Amino acid sequence: MSLPHAILTALLERPSSGLELTRRFDKSFGFFWSATHQQIYRELGKLEQSGFIRALASQTPARGQKKEYEVLPAGREELAAWAAAGQQPRPMRDPLLLRMRAAAVVGTDGLDAELRRHLALHESQLALYEGIERRDFPPERDSEQDRLRHLVLRGGIELETFWIRWLTQALDTVAEER
């Protein structure tokens, strides 16, 4: 149920076309809730049928023109109810952790290369997040909305920092075992 709520959130932040939404997902929402372009377009249709959003009237009607969507009051109410509701945390499912467990019984050949690859990916993601933080959250941006958005980004930064620290420790452990 989270994709429709992510779309409602994005549209409440700024009415957008489907193409604009997919671009925004690629640059922000997708860091913590991924969706394909096809999923986003399909969900826009469902949200419109449910009466949660509507396509804005175009100033210049033309065939093939992109629709821009806005959230209706029912959509805002749905999002508010969802945001206030409780939900259990999802259990972690990470293939790398399973590989580590398997390596404990079959040996660590090749594992260090995979750990280094993951480390490089997490270092790159951390650098991206820190760049976004510098660009989008200077000290003077201090509204409640900005603080909450920044907190989401800080969660991503903290997760990447954790993975970098853990992967470094894992590489040290694998090296010690040799």
Image (cartoon, rainbow, N blue to C red):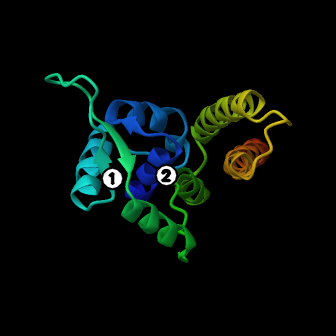
Q: Secondary structure at mark 1?
A: strand
Count of marks, rendered view: 2
Q: Secondary structure at mark 2?
A: helix
Q: Up-down: is 123 above or below 173?
A: above
Mark yes or no: residue 65 visible: yes
Which amino acid is tagged 2?
A: Thr
Q: CA distance from mark 1 to mark 2?
A: 11 Å
In this rendering, position of residue 2 left or right of residue 37: right
Image point (40%, 31%), residue name: 20
Residue carrying label 2:
9
The C terminus, quarter of image: top right
Residue carrying label 1:
53
**Which of pointers 1 and 2 indicates the residue nearer the eye?**
1
Which amino acid is tagged 1?
A: Ile
What crowding class fits label 2: few (fewer than 14 Cα within 10 Å), some (14-19), or many (20 or more)?
some
Image point (43%, 58%), residue name: 5
Outermost residue on the left side: it is 63
Outermost residue on the front side: it is 59
What x and y, as percent, mark residue 143? Answer: 76, 47
What x and y, as percent, mark residue 127? Answer: 71, 29
* Mark nearer the N terminus (1 vs 2): 2
Q: Nearer the viewer, residue 164 or 128?
A: 128
Image point (68%, 50%), residue name: 145
What x and y, as percent, mark residue 53? Answer: 33, 52
Image point (61%, 46%), residue name: 108
Find out whether the residues at labels 1 and 2 contact each other: C-beta distance under 8 Å: no
Q: Nearer the viewer, residue 49 or 60?
A: 60
Q: Up-down: is 31 above or below 128?
A: below
Q: Up-down: is 41 above or below 123?
A: below
Q: Up-down: is 73 above or below 159?
A: below
Q: Which disc, if any, is residue 100?
A: none
Q: Nearer the viewer, residue 172 or 165?
A: 165
